[in-house]
Image: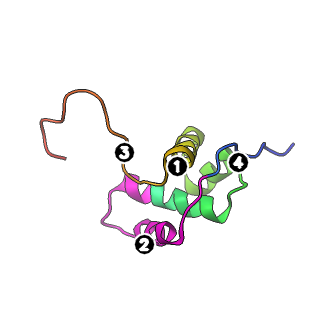
C-alpha cells in the first residue's frame, strides 16, 4: 500500500536551494545546519515523497522530517532554530 502524500509542501526559491546545496557539502558547518540543508535539497527534488521515504533518504527520523516540512510550509525557509523561551544561555555556544 503506498504511503499518503504529505499535507505540508514547502516552496523553495532558487537562492534558498543554492544556499542549501552550498551548506550541505560543508564539513565545517554545524551538523544540524548540514542536516537541514540536505533535507531542503531532498524535499525540493522529491516533494511528493512521504515523511518516511525522505527520512530514510536523509538518515533522519520521520518526526524530524515532519517538523521541518511543516515549519517551512507555514513560516518560510530558515535553517535556524526557533526562538526558545526562558532564561538566555549563560555560556557561549
Indicate yes or no whether the magenta region holds residue 2: no
Earlier-in-chain disc, 4 versus 1 = 4
Going from the N terminus, do you reach mark 1 or mark 3 first? Answer: 1
Residue under numbered circle 2: 22
* Label 2, label 1: how far apart the Cα atoms are: 19 Å
Q: Which residue is located at x 59 percent, y 53 percent?
A: 10
N-term-proximal mark, 4 vs 3: 4
Disc assigned to residue 72:
1
Q: Residue at x 47, y 60 (%)?
A: 37
Q: Is residue 36 left or right of residue 88?
A: right
Disc 4 is placed on an element classified as: loop
Q: Nearer the viewer, mark 1 or mark 3?
A: 1
Residue at x 29%, y 29% (from the top left corner): 85
Assess disc 1: are there few (<14), some (14-19) or many (≥20) residues with their C-alpha within 10 Å of its C-alpha: some
Q: Which residues are magenta?
A: 10-35
What numbered label is drawn on residue 81? 3
Q: Of discs 4 and 3, which sits in the foreground?
A: 3
| Residue at left offset 53%, top offset 56% | 39
- The Cα atoms of the two marked residues, 1 and 3, are separated by 12 Å
From the image, tell me which residue sits under label 4: 50
x and y percentages locating residue 13 in the rendered image: 54, 66
Amino acid at each position: 500500500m503506498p504511503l499518503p502524500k504529505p499535507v505540508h509542501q514547502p516552496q523553495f526559491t532558487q537562492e534558498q536551494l543554492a544556499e542549501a546545496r552550498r551548506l550541505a557539502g560543508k564539513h565545517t558547518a554545524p551538523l544540524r545546519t548540514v542536516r537541514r540543508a540536505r533535507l531542503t535539497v531532498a524535499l525540493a527534488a522529491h516533494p511528493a515523497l512521504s515523511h518516511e521515504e525522505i527520512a530514510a533518504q536523509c538518515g533522519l527520523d520521520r518526526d524530524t522530517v515532519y517538523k521541518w516540512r511543516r515549519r517551512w510550509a507555514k513560516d518560510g525557509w530558515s535553517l535556524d532554530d526557533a526562538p526558545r523561551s526562558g532564561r538566555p544561555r549563560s555560556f557561549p555556544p
